[in-house]
Amino acid sequence: MSVDARPQGYPKWVVTAMWVSAVLIAVGSYRFLIADVALVMPAMLHHALERPLMFYLHIGLAPIALALLPLQFSKGLRKARPAVHRWLGRLYGVSILLAGISGIWLAYTTEEGPVAALGLALLALAWLWTTGLAVWHAMRRRFAQHRAWMIRSAALTLAAVTLRIYLPIGSATVGFEASYPVICWIAWVPNLMLAEWILRRGRGAPVGATA
């Protein structure tokens, strides 16, 4: 598979590392299938006990969207198998629809305080909004707009990667309780800002974005 969706001037190894990280984290997110949630996701245990439907919808479907990103940004797949690209796009959209709705509910019921709750809720809303617009434009064959909104959607989907980068750093420095509310914002706001910067560069349009 050739994954060549990258802004002009960005080394291929950077994009490759991003996609590999996305797939590894997506696969690793299913560790709850073989291990106790209390051991592998202690901060989420209260969700698993009190609202299991929303919890398992979110952690079950969000990794699917994350794992699909390299495929959806593959120029080779899009050209060789456009029907596969479209069906995977539908799966991506449905996964985010359900994971985003459940994410809003989990944010509303989090025990980590209002700052964390607001950050997570806005992330879920922005995730739903950007993905919804990407789908809307694709259905109307407005491919330039579709590509732009998919870049934004991908940036928010990749919050799963940046979150897992920041969590151990925060826990090792100021502790989980102090760092988590901040991480709930910096895991996605800079991602979205970077996506906007890429889209506004003029020469930085992705060459393998979805269509």
Image: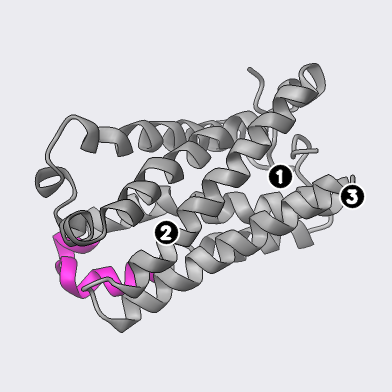
Compared to 88, does 139 lie above or below?
below
**Secondary-structure class at tag 2:** helix
For the N terminus, the quadrant is top right
Local packing at callout 1 (Cα closer than 10 Å; few below 14, some 14-19, many 20+) is many
Local packing at callout 3 (Cα closer than 10 Å; few below 14, some 14-19, many 20+) is some
For the C terminus, the quadrant is top right
Q: Residue at x 37, y 41 (%)?
A: 60
Residue highlighted by disc 2: 102
Residue highlighted by disc 1: 7
Looking at the image, is mark 2 or mark 3 earlier in the sequence? 2
Q: Residue at x 58, y 37 (%)?
A: 69
Give the foreground label among 2 and 3. 2
User: Mark 3 to mark 1: distance in Å?
Assistant: 20 Å
Q: Is residue 198 left or right of residue 56?
A: right
Q: Residue at x 81, y 46 (%)?
A: 138
- Residue contact between numbered discs 1 and 2, judged by CB atoms under 8 Å: no
Between 36 and 149, the one nearer to me in the picture: 36
The amino acid type, in three-letter code, at marker 3 is Arg
Q: Position of residue 23 (x, y in %)?
A: 44, 32
Image: magenta residue range: 170-185
The amino acid type, in three-letter code, at marker 1 is Pro
Give the foreground label among 3 and 1. 3
Residue highlighted by disc 3: 142
**Secondary-structure class at tag 1:** loop
Q: Is residue 74 left or right of residue 95?
A: right
Between 181 and 99, the one nearer to me in the picture: 99
Does residue 146 appear in the picture of this structure?
A: yes
